[in-house]
Image (cartoon, helix red, strand yellow):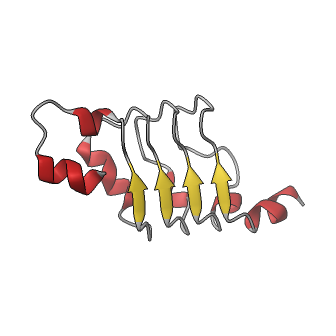
Amino acid sequence: EGIAVMGSLQEADFSSNRITTLEVDGDSAGLQAVEVLNLSNNQIASLSGIAKATAVKTLNLAQNQVAALGELKHLATLSVTDVDLRDNPIIEEPGADPVRTELLI
């Protein structure tokens, strides 16, 4: 019954939980209906595993450890319209192209 209840969850706030990975243990059915996912203020460096959250439209990844531009490829299969990457090393890269930074923010 827990999975069925989670299946209808549309917003999930996992901020400030010391999460280091987006890999889901066991059944990921609970993430499939989530449209707003807050993962801010964690220690996430890799976005692999986010593809299981197929309905996500708003994704907050502010204040994490995402450093590689290539990590954004994991968002390609999602219907995300709003991604917050503020205060990640990918944004703070010295000499970062201001246009790229604006697109990421």
- Residue 85, above or below 53: above
Residue 96 position by quadrant: top left
Q: How many marks?
A: 0
Rendering coords of residue 45 (x, y %) = 40, 35
Left or right of 32 on screen, residue 91? left
Left or right of 91 on screen, residue 66? right
Rendering coords of residue 4 (x, y %) = 82, 65
Left or right of 96 on screen, residue 91? right
- Residue 44, above or below 32: above
Is 7 in front, or is 88? Answer: 88
- Residue at the far right: name it: 1
Measuring 40% from the left and 56% from the top, which residue is drawn there? Answer: 83
Measuring 13% from the left and 47% from the top, which residue is drawn there? Answer: 98
Rendering coords of residue 15 (x, y %) = 60, 39
Rendering coords of residue 26 (x, y %) = 70, 48
If the image is split into quadrants, where does the N terminus sit? Answer: bottom right
Measuring 44% from the left and 71% from the top, which residue is drawn there? Answer: 79
Measuring 69% from the left and 62% from the top, which residue is drawn there? Answer: 29
Left or right of 56 on screen, residue 11? right
Is 73 in front, or is 25? Answer: 73
- Residue 84, above or below 94: below
Is 98 in front, or is 67? Answer: 98
